[in-house]
Image: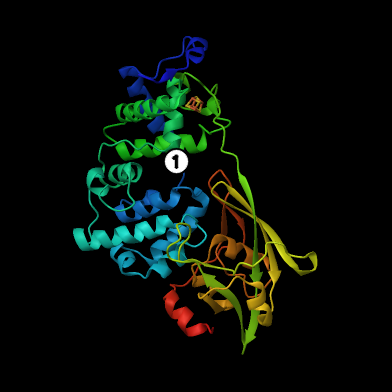
Amino acid sequence: MEVTYNQRMKVEAGGVARSDSPEAHVDIRLCLLAWYDRNRRSLPWRRTRDPYAIWVSEIMLQQTRVATVIERFQDFLRNFPTVSALANAGEQDVLALWSGLGYYRRARMLHHAAKVVVQEHGGVMPKTAAALRGLPGIGAYTSAAVASIAFGEKVAVVDGNVERVIQRLAGWGSDSATGQTELAREIAKRAEVLLDPNRPGDFNQATMELGATLCLPRKPLCLTCPLRDHCVTRGEHPTLQRAAMRSQDAAYGLAVRSRGAHREVLLQQRPAELTVMPGMWELPPLRSVEVPGEHLRLAVRHAIMQVNYYVRVRTVYEGDVDELMVPSETRRWVSLNQLGGIALTGLARKVLLRSGLPELTQLPVVMENTGKGVAPVAGRSARRAKPRSAAAKLAGGVSQ
Ligand code: SF4
């Protein structure tokens, strides 16, 4: 096979128990599960066997940090407690509750799949990994996680944490693109071999937990690792290079006007055909990214995927909108006290929170892709009442 075993590590680790003998597999299961039973974090999705709730948590946890998901998960389930409730919700309401978590395609696919569960499975979640993979947006990782945790199916989960743990345990590396493919196959095979047949869900979570809390990407905490005696590398491992971030300038207008007792902000909806955040609401972009210093309201950096956006925001008066802003058919004036239920982009949320508008203290935490996953960067979290339909809000509280 093309996998390159790291010979240096094998030699230097002379005397270390190998992780690939049947005896070692048994011991690894015992050590890892005993450690997990003592040290696992108390997380809301670990207190349920409801496959729908576990599915929601697994989708949220992709790209988003645990601390952030905890509150958003509970908020989401309060509003959509069952797969049927989610299926019957409007897309804008689902996006509004996802707002700030980033990677909105996840929310759309979750919503779409919930409708398929209701229409094709009578509202009952499929019980096997193979059947779950038939749902939109559910791949090998999510199907294995839900099937093993909710239904006890003996199927191994392989995510980035599991890959890293197994690679380090075995001392595996790869020097070529072909080798990477082979390596991924070997890791998947090893994950299946190691899986505890009696507690597959716990074992999967334990391996992920080890990767998330001890076997860290940069500085693994090997001294406290329960698998130290079976680990070939013990922290001596090559560190993967992160892809370099690109930079891009952008400029948006912040237009606020008074209407009766309320104030309104001008937003516009991103076209439905975009691949990034379609249908979300954002501040209107300016015709020019150059904003003279005397007009600069604030400047923020905002990371999306591998791009750092350096964003300038200027105050735009109502009479200057057409002159300064890029023309759009989808602009709407939205009451500031309705923004909590609108599907705003993370950048719009960040700018509005930093703009100093006193009405905006109740928006959820702003999230940003820091390159290490999505992390909170500004704002104040807040529990929200069940949102009215976003479309109804826009129709009732907005004038053109
Ligand atoms: S000993 Fe260190 S490198 Fe090996 S699995 Fe444990 S934390 Fe990871």
Quadrant where the N terminus lies? Answer: top left
Placement of the C terminus among the 4 image quadrants = bottom right
Q: Is residue 35 above or below residue 288?
A: above
The residue located at (56%, 46%) in the rendering is 306
Q: Nearer the viewer, residue 208 or 9?
A: 9
Outermost right residue: 294
Position of residue 379 in the picture relative to residue 46 (left or right): right
> With respect to residue 151, does 240 lie above or below?
above
Residue 91 placement (x, y as % from top left): 39, 67
Q: Residue at x 35, y 57 (%)?
A: 110
Type of amino acid under label 1? Arg
Label 1: which secondary element: loop
Q: Is residue 191 left or right of residue 336?
A: left
State whether residue 50 appears in this view: no
Front position in the image: 380 or 325: 325
Q: Is the CB–ligand 1 distance for label 1 below 8 Å? A: no
| Residue position for label 1 | 40
Give the residue displayed 45% in from the left and 24% down from the top.
176
Q: Is residue 14 visible?
A: yes
* Corner quadrant of residue 178: top left
- Return the x and y of residue 220 as percentages of the image width and height: 55, 30
Locate residue 160, reporting x and y percent: 44, 37
Q: Residue furthest bottom?
A: 260
Residue 28 is left or right of residue 233, and the answer is: left
User: Is 101 left, or right, of 348 in this rendering?
Assistant: left
The residue that appears at 58% across and 70% down in the rendered structure is 362
Give the answer, above or below, for where 212 lies relative to 326: above
